[in-house]
Image (cartoon, grey):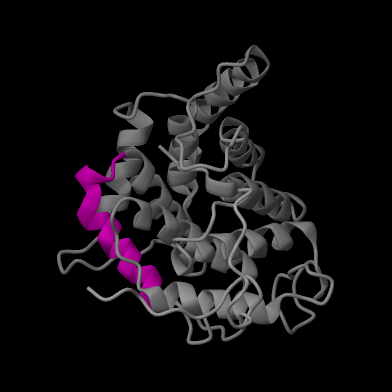
Amino acid sequence: MIYVDYGVFAISNGAFLLELSSMNILPFHIRLTVVLIVLVVGGFSSSAESADPPTDPRVKGPVAKAVRLIKQNYSKSIKKTGGYQTLSAYALAKAGEAIDGTEITQAIEAINKKVHDDGTYHPLDHHYSIYEAGMDLMFLADVHAEENWDAIEAIGNYLVKEQHGPGFWTYPGETIGDTSITQYAMLGLWGATRVGYETPMDTWNRSARWLSATQLQDGGFTYKPGTGEGFDLGRSNPNMTNAGAGCLLIARLYLYPDKPEWGSKEKEDTSGPKKAFGVLQATKPAAG
């Protein structure tokens, strides 16, 4: 089941939904799928706990209706590339559907087919490849990690390889960092790391450096930093701010594993030298 430290997953997926919904990119049943995931994990805590299916009657009713609609439209998600099938199956799993059910089993089989005999992962949608890989990795890590370890390792290796030098991820063929795509790569790697995949410390370090460097003066984040491109025209907006802040928190988990838990009353030791990035700084992985 998904870990919900700091609510990053719920925040980031909710932000992504709002981002795409505002541009009418996703059909209704897919938007509903993301809403369902956010709704089910919405009662997050600050500790690494699983998000169980909802028990509150006010939530159970809407979730049950959403599950029926997702199943009715599941065949449509199979026909689309870019992670739609995975997203639908992931929502069903989070809603408490049996993980050996038809839809979830089909999604797992579809992901494993993307892993070739040489152990490399090949997403079906070239343009949205990082979104697809991030969703596939989150799903497998949460639902059937041990049984699909080869696929988890292959997708993790793919995302690590696709990170650009400064620390971001973006669309194929582009050289400008993309905050939205970066969040999905980091969410995928976060899921894989929690079940044993060894994400290189340099991957977290470079992503934290890029995010710290591209945070705007008002504290927010934008879609394509340093440009006027995208729906926000280079200005900070809530969707990308949630994505950027959430990714910084993910990086913090691995750059500072011994730090007090977020929200803890335990005070940090501030007697040492000032940190290069405020809450983040470069660290070396532990020996051994």
- Picture layout, residue 43 above or below residue 6: above
Read off the magenta span. Answer: 144-161
Q: Is residue 44 above or below residue 120?
A: above
Could you tell me which quadrant the N terminus lies in?
top left
Q: Nearer the viewer, residue 262 or 115?
A: 262
Q: Residue furthest front?
A: 271
Q: Residue at x 35, y 73 (%)?
A: 200
Residue 288, located in which quarter of the rendered image?
Answer: bottom left
Point out residue 76 in the picture as x, y percentages from the top left corner. 50, 39
For the point 66% across and 75% down, the residue is 278
Q: Is residue 41 left or right of residue 150?
A: right
Q: Is residue 258 above or below residue 135?
A: below
Who's the residue at 69% across and 54% down the image? Answer: 20
- The answer to whether residue 75 of the structure is visible from this angle is no
| SS majority, magenta | helix
Percent position (x, y) of residue 262? 60, 52
